[in-house]
Amino acid sequence: MKTIGILTLSPSNLSEFIQNNLEKVFSDHITIHSYYLSDLKRHDIITDDVVVVTAQSHAIEAQHYISDNSRIILLRRTLPNREIYKITAIPKGTNVLVVNDLPETTTEAITFLYQLGITHLNLIAWDPKQEYYGINIAITLGEANAVPPYIKKIIDVGHRYIDISTFLSLLNFFNLDTPETSKHLIKYSDTIVTLDTGIKNRYKELFMKNMQLDKVVNLSHDAILLTDKDHIILLHNKKFSQLFDITENIIGKSIFDVIPNECLQRSDLGTMDELIQFKDRSLLASSSKIEYFGEPAGIYYNFQEVTYIRNLEKSLSKKLRESGLVTRYTFENIQTKSPKMKDCINFAKLLSPKNHTVLITGESGTGKELIAHSIHAASPRSMYPFIAINCASFPENLLESELFGYEAGSFTGAIKEGKPGLFEQANNGTIFLDEVGDMPLSVQVRLLRVLQERQIMRVGSPKVVDVDLRVIAATNKDLQTEIRKGLFRQDLFYRLNVLPIMIPPLRERPEDIIPLLHFFMSKHHNQKITLTQEAEWRLLKYNWFGNVRELINTAAYLSCMAVQTVDVNNLPVYILSSLTNFDSEFSYIFAHCDKEKAYLVLSVLENCPSGAGRKWIEAKCTECAMNITESEIRRFLSIFSEMDLVDSQVGRRGSCLTAKGQQFVTWLKGKSLLA
Ligand SMILES: Nc1ncnc2c1ncn2[C@@H]1O[C@H](COP(=O)(O)OP(=O)(O)OP(=O)(O)O)[C@@H](O)[C@H]1O
């Protein structure tokens, strides 16, 4: 415990009086000892932390008895309020004798009374050798015995009280400026006349400010902590103790002994909202430096508990994962060495945080879906559903009810309670409309309304529902051509084409072919291969009409070959044949079909990569002044199919060229047999 020694001249009740004063403010925080100059022996040493003296001369006299480590403080003293009123009540101009034990202490007492503002009296210093008949009032500071007996009225103001400025020095020295001592000091100061009222008022003001600050800090829901520049804790609120499970007093301790280092951003002070984990709690931590005239003075820390929000987030993303409504890819999953593709990705990254509609175009298998997933994953909507639908794989009516939902009993086969559509399910998230070019015109009209109004109407319901979602659409069709054909609405095109991304086909980014093949060999088949120079050359020369998806198939094929070094003979036949020749196919077609007509059908199919029906092919041939009947077309398609040149599908897509078919057409062009 800290100690104070009170040094007075000789045993008297003055020492007890001073002790009493000190205890009023320090209560039990300090141990007090009393010493008397008259009693000190030659080798006595006072070792208290502070030694208080009532006069400078005492300090000089006693300096040999006081340890060098002790601090000597001269007490400034004053009067209690109640005594000063007795003096101020004496009429102005009255002669008043001031009496103390010695002539010098009497002069000191007069000076002190002037300091207190007693200027309305004629103060006369007592001299024991003089007579003072005619003076009726005497003021004394506890020396009533010395007052001449003929003086009728004695005002004995008694011992002087310790002034507030001395207390402030002591509080500062002992670093004991706690709310408790402040309260005691303010109470005490109200009972005395303060020598310097400025200090008293400032102290009161400061105390009030501290109380207010304390309230504000403790009312905060965030944990707050303040340290000095050496990371010593100066202040913290209750929430801080709660959040970090602190039960003991941590004021004065180093912050690094109180909270784990990983919760503090030591290296990066000034960081905002960094997510940290303390036990099972998630906290957003911020810190900032406090400076005093440009010099570091301390650090302010703020911790906000976000465990509840994090848990909500986790359960939401768990639900989304369980229902499969999350993205499977991010930009990190896109492998590329191609500058063209890198431009695409950079543009996609740039527009990810925005809310605008995106239209991704590119041949089949180029990675359109991959980009759509990545945009959603990098957008502020990533916490919400990502719903993908392939518009080509649903018949017209079903697509409409899938997208917009339906009301109870709106059509035969509908679920009794009705069903929300994908637009509603994607609320707050993203809907990915794949193959949007194949969307029937009736559904296009409804989609337009969603894009314009951000509202949907369930099938069979007049009710309008607001939706907040981002639309990403993709197609491998040339929508301008579709518009010309009357198969795609122009107004919808402009609504979709806000942020267009065009993904180049693999043949336009040859730098991707070999790295992607190695990537898929290792990712899907856990195999490492080496390619001979010729095999590599063949792969680079191939046209990859099926793009990355076709490359994935090639990787699967090579994995079955089970060779470590892949030679040209190990490559799939369609890759080899693309570079050799199609003589046998050519002869077969020459033998079984009208060559010109057959070439024209192939050329129509080439210009229709997403597929064409027989009627469409017939119409196109007529446009080119070639009359071919539907049954002729059917026969040609079946021959092409036999040779694996055409894939004749059921449903709305009709027939389209296979990768081999496309190679064949290229080969024909190379031989100038096809324009
Ligand atoms: N750059 C790439 N890096 C890694 N994987 C890729 C890349 N590009 C495409 N893929 C993979 O290729 C396959 C086809 O890609 P995706 O489905 O995105 O193409 P798409 O253009 O949407 O095709 P479609 O038009 O036929 O729907 C997917 O398995 C995808 O993961």
Image (tube, helix red, strand yellow):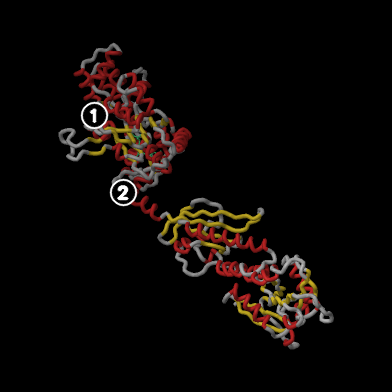
Q: Which of disc 1 and disc 2 is earlier in sequence? A: 2
Measuring from the top left, give residue 332's x and y in whole percent.
43, 43
Choose between 410 and 187: the one closer to the eye.
187
Label 2 sits on residue: 319
Left or right? Give the position of 599 relative to 236: left
Q: Which of 165/133 is in front?
A: 133
Q: Amino acid at mark 1?
A: Glu
Q: Position of residue 474 (x, y in %)?
A: 35, 32
Badge 2 amino acid: Lys
Query: Taking 173 as reference, is 272 left or right?
Result: left
Hey, which residue is sitting farthest right in the picture? Answer: 129
Q: Is residue 256 left or right of residue 387?
A: right
Closer mark to the observer between disc 2 and disc 1:
2
What residue is drawn where x is 67% and y is 61%?
Answer: 198
Q: Look at 67% across and 63% down and name the residue there.
A: 197
Q: Mark 2 falls on what kind of element?
A: helix
State the image coordinates of residue 134 (x, y, percent, origin top left): 80, 75
- Image quarter for residue 532? top left
Q: Is residue 540 visible?
A: yes
Mark 2 CB lies closer than 8 A to ligand 1 = no
The residue closer to the viewer here, 243 or 589, is 243
Q: Please identify the quarter of the rendering in which residue 184 is found.
A: bottom right
Q: Quadrant of the N terminus?
A: bottom right
Q: How many marks?
A: 2
Disc number for residue 396: 1
- The residue lying at 29 percent from left, 48 percent from top is 322
